[in-house]
Amino acid sequence: MNIASWLQRTARLSGDRPAILLGETVLADYRAFFDRVSSLAASLRADNIEPGDRVAIAAKNCPDYLIAMFAAWIAGAVIVPVNAKLHAKEVAWILDNSGAKLVFADPDMAGALHGHFTGPIRILGSELAERPGTEAPLPLHSCRADANAWLFYTSGTTGRPKGVQITHGMLAAMSLAYLSDVDDIRPEMAAYYAAPMSHGAGLYAPVHVLRGTRHLLPHAGHFDPDNLLDLSERCGPTSLFLAPTMVQRLKEQAKATGRRGEGIGTIVYGGGPMYRADIEDALSWFGPKFVQIFGQGECPMAITALSRKDVADRSHPRWRERLASVGRAQSFVEVAIGTHDGALLPTGELGEIMVRGLPVMPGYWRNPEANAATLRDGWLMTGDVGYLDEDGYLTLQDRSKDVIISGGTNIYPREVEEVLLMHPSVKEVSVVGRPSAEWGEDVVAFIVLANGAEFDRAALEQQCLAEIARFKKPKDYVVVQELPKNNYGKILKTAIRASLAKMDKYSF
């Protein structure tokens, strides 16, 4: 079952429907989209790309990204989408590890890769636009559902990234779970690509192709809150995936300009923790537009979902509790809590989050050691810590490696972060542990102050003592201008710990 068959199906049934837009300009309807993809697939075959070969895409968001994705799939190849903000040496490592035979790259990355990659490089946004596509269309390659479609390299914040094998069947299950558990997609909607297509936004492309919606690419090629607000007003209703930090930027810009997100239909948020205070504020400003998902590259976008109703229903007696959760298991998975060894724990107990089902990876690319540590008796051991309530809502605490052990007691950074964010002077916060001869670890909070706010240690101490046990409050505070984040908006605690280790003194 080739996921590109969905494009073929939509092109046949609704070929004159607008498909790819750059800003407000329609570049292709679905018939032209499929024709161009099929022709490029034939060109790939002429360049000796065979079924199972890896084709990398190292580029910022652009219309040709979609064409390259689906062309590779039609040819039976496996795409390797690469974070466009990585250094060329990091990209080269991924290309070498994956065995990529060809790279689609934007002009900046293409220039940087010379000297690091000896294979052919095709430039997105110029070469494809200039090629008339005269090759005879390549028929859709038929494959099994367990054939690899996407090789996703983890962010590598704790070492070399690992390649997650994502199959055609996994993409299909994830997509159908979206329709069942996340949001209905209507043909008149537009998928706005704000987040990188090398990650969650690109993973959602197939389900929007299945439903024949428009694919809206901003001219800037990156997230621009003003552009999103403007284009949604003119081209909406839009549906988009945003990391929590992007939701924050969008909200701040909307408030500054007095706009309420008219034309935005659905914002799916995930990829990192969205603190309760932040989503409450965003909900109050934009209204019921939000759905939360929780997933990992190893089970992409498909572990749990917190529905639009759950996010917005303030009348429910447990609304705020559920808002702090990541929702319930999506339709194609089971979620459980267990010990590190995989023994199941009862409802309400804290432990490692485990998941199994159709969207779970078959394993990492050529990494049997990582497979043995992560896949046990059919379960994916996520490395995240959390608990399930009696209604099946999953609440995350932290990554197991982020837990702080002080005086023999576990302290979960997210709990402390939630409390500090309740104070109006705190814009962003990340809590980490610092080695302590006396306690094992001390709690240290890195904070970004709100505009115009001054650091007031006593006020933050009082905030913590009013909400959590005394032993959980930070021992020290570090005031910073910004927190380090990766291209997907995740706060890099590894980088924060590294900077903490180098400090001789702290700005408390």
Image (cartoon, helix red, strand yellow):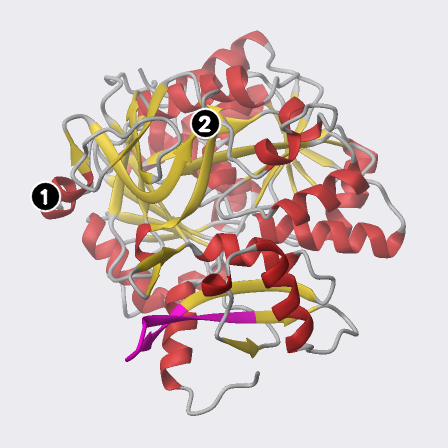
Which of the two residues, 362 or 251, is positioned nearer the viewer here?
A: 251
Q: Which residue is mark 2?
A: 389
Q: Which residue is mark 1?
A: 368
Amino acid type at circle 2 is Asp
User: Please, is residue 143 above or below residue 478 in the view?
Assistant: above
Amino acid type at circle 1 is Pro
Confirm whether residue 428 shows in the render: yes
Residue 186 highlighted magenta (yes or no): no
Count neighbours of disc 2 (C-alpha within 10 A) and say few if under 14, some if 14 to 19, many if 20 or more.
Answer: some
- On the image, the x and y values in percent for residue 138 come to 35, 23
Residue placed farthest to the bottom in the image?
A: 504
User: Please, is residue 222 above or below residue 34 in the view?
Assistant: below
Seen at 60% across and 41% down, the residue is 193
Secondary structure of the residue carrying tag 1 is: helix
User: Please, is residue 284 above or below residue 30 in the view?
Assistant: below
User: Please, is residue 452 above or below residue 51 in the view?
Assistant: below
